[in-house]
Image (tube, grey):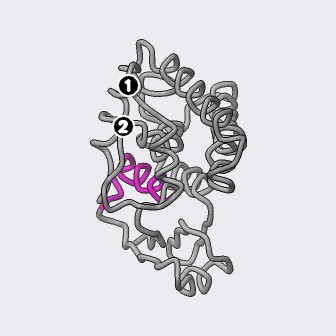
Amino acid sequence: MIRLYRAAFSTNCERVTLALAHKGLDDQVESVWIDYADRSPVQAVSGQGLVPVADNDGTVIADSLAILRYLEELVPEPPLFPPGAARRAEMELFLDWFDRVWKVAPNAIEADPGGPGVPALSATMDAHLDRFEALLSGRDHLLGPEFSAADCTAYPFLKYAGGREPADDELFHRILEEHQSADGRPALAAWIDRVAARVLP
C-alpha cells in the first residue's frame, strides 16, 4: 500500500495522482490529507513540510517529479517515460524546463500581484501557451501520441487555462486562471479535457 501525503487542490499532488491512475495503482493508494496549517504528519514521515510525499512500506519519496520517477521503476508498464537515452533526455529536459523556466512567471506574479512587471509576465505565460498549442498539433499528448510524465507535470498548471473550480480559491491558482486562456487554442483545450478524464478524486 502506497501512502500519499497530499493537500486539497495541490498542483504538485495532482501530478502524482495522474501518474498513479495511469499505472493502475488506484486501489493501492491511501491518501493522507494535510492541512496547510498543520504540516506535522508529513514532517514526521519525511523531515520536511511539503507535499506530495509517498511512503511505500517505508520507502519515503518527497517531490512530485521524484515520485513519478520512482513509480516508473516500481511499475514500468504502462510507461510514463520513453525508452532510449535520447528520448529520455528529451523528457528530462521538458520536466526541468517546466519547473525552472515555465514556473518563473506565475511565481513572480504571486510574489507581487500588483507589481509593474505583471503585464510582461502575463505576456510570457500567454506566449508559453502558444508553444503548448504547437506541441499538441497533430498529436494527443505533449511529447508524442502517448500519455507521459510530461502531461502529468504540466496539466495541473495548464488546466487553469480552461477555468477553475469555485471551491479552489488559492491565489496561485487564480493567477493561473487569470493569465492563461485556452480560447483560440483548440488543441490545448482538447488536451485539457482529455487529461481531465484521467484525474483521480
Which region shows up in magenta?
13-26
Q: Amino acid at mark 2?
A: Gly
| SS of the residue under disc 2 | helix
Label 1 belongs to which residue? 183
| SS of the residue under disc 1 | loop
Q: Quadrant of residue 172?
A: bottom right
Q: Main secondary structure of the magenta part?
A: helix
Give the camera-side residue of 199 and 125.
125
Q: Residues within 10 Å of mark 1 (few under 14, many from 20)?
A: few
- Of labels 2 and 1, earlier in sequence is 2
Label 2 belongs to which residue? 162
Residue lying at 62% horizontally and 76% vertically, measured from the top left: 49
In the picture, the quarter occupied by the N terminus is bottom left
Q: Amino acid at mark 1?
A: Asp
In the picture, the quarter occupied by the C terminus is bottom left
Instruction: Give the percent coordinates (x, y) of residue 53.
Output: 55, 69
Q: CA distance from mark 2 to mark 1?
A: 8 Å
Residue lying at 37% horizontally and 46% vertically, measured from the top left: 22
Instruction: Give the percent coordinates (x, y) of residue 192.
Output: 36, 35
Q: Which mark is residue 5?
A: none
